[in-house]
Amino acid sequence: MISVVDRQSLIDGLGLKSVARTGWLRVGIEDVESVAAHSWGMAFIASQICPDEIDRAKVIEMCIVHDLAEVVTGDITPHDGVSTAEKSRLERAAFEQLSLADNTEQLFDEYEQQVTLEARFVRFVDRLDMALQASVYEAKGADLSEFKESVKDLAHDHGFSHLLE
């Protein structure tokens, strides 16, 4: 069954375009990308490198919705002192405030649980987008090696190292 999403829910979801990526702000980058720009970057990267054995359409949709709760919670980073359990609770509560299509929360849950190949690939793409964006900011004079290193370990752990070559 297709759910009907009201106009206000669509407007609320588009609010992600004005949520700044706080990790970049924390290290002193000015004029940072939005969370929506990050999600678009992930969807673009996934569309280009998704292996044939992974459901590309599902991956792209998961890229788009994986940070949607941040419309309500803001961009919570590991440096904010919020536990993983509390972040999960806040994000779950955020989805209850947003009236979105039925599969949106299911895709978010799948991403959070990391049990499917698609979810693990999206987590890798999440880090890859961050590493590539760090390269963009480094070209402007910042040292962001900490952001670029995290993708290598995750790629190795999930079997996607060949995609970094």
Image (spheres, rainbow, N blue to C red):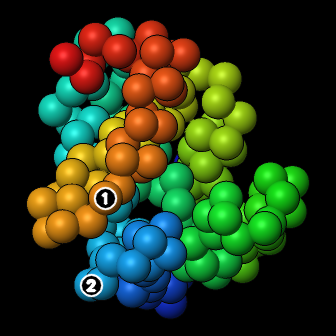
Viewport quadrant of the C terminus? top left
Which quarter of the figure has residue 121? top left
- Tell me the CA gap for discs 2 and 1: 16 Å
Q: Is residue 49 found left or right of 28 in the rendered image?
A: left
> How many residues crowd mark 1 within 10 Å: few (<14), some (14–19), many (20+)?
few
Q: Is residue 49 found left or right of 158 in the rendered image?
A: left
Nearest to the eye among marks 2 and 1: give it: 1
Q: Residue at x 46, y 15 (%)?
A: 156
| Circle 1: element type | loop
Depicted 51 relative to depicted 72: above or below = above
Residue 105 in percent (x, y) is at 64, 54
Give the residue number, with chain letter if any, for mark 2: 31
Q: Residue at x 26, y 65 (%)?
A: 142
Q: Which mark is residue 73?
A: none
Q: Is residue 6 visible?
A: no
- The one nearer the camera, 18 or 118, is 18
Give the residue number, with chain letter if any, for mark 1: 143
Depicted 57 relative to depicted 80: above or below = above
Q: Is residue 153 visible?
A: yes
> How many residues crowd mark 2 within 10 Å: few (<14), some (14–19), many (20+)?
few
Q: Residue at x 49, y 24 (%)?
A: 153
Q: For the residue marked with disc 1, what is the amino acid?
A: Asp
Of mark 2 and mark 1, the one earlier in the sequence is 2
Q: Residue at x 67, y 42 (%)?
A: 112
Residue 85 in percent (x, y) is at 87, 54
Q: For the residue marked with disc 2, what is the amino acid?
A: Asp
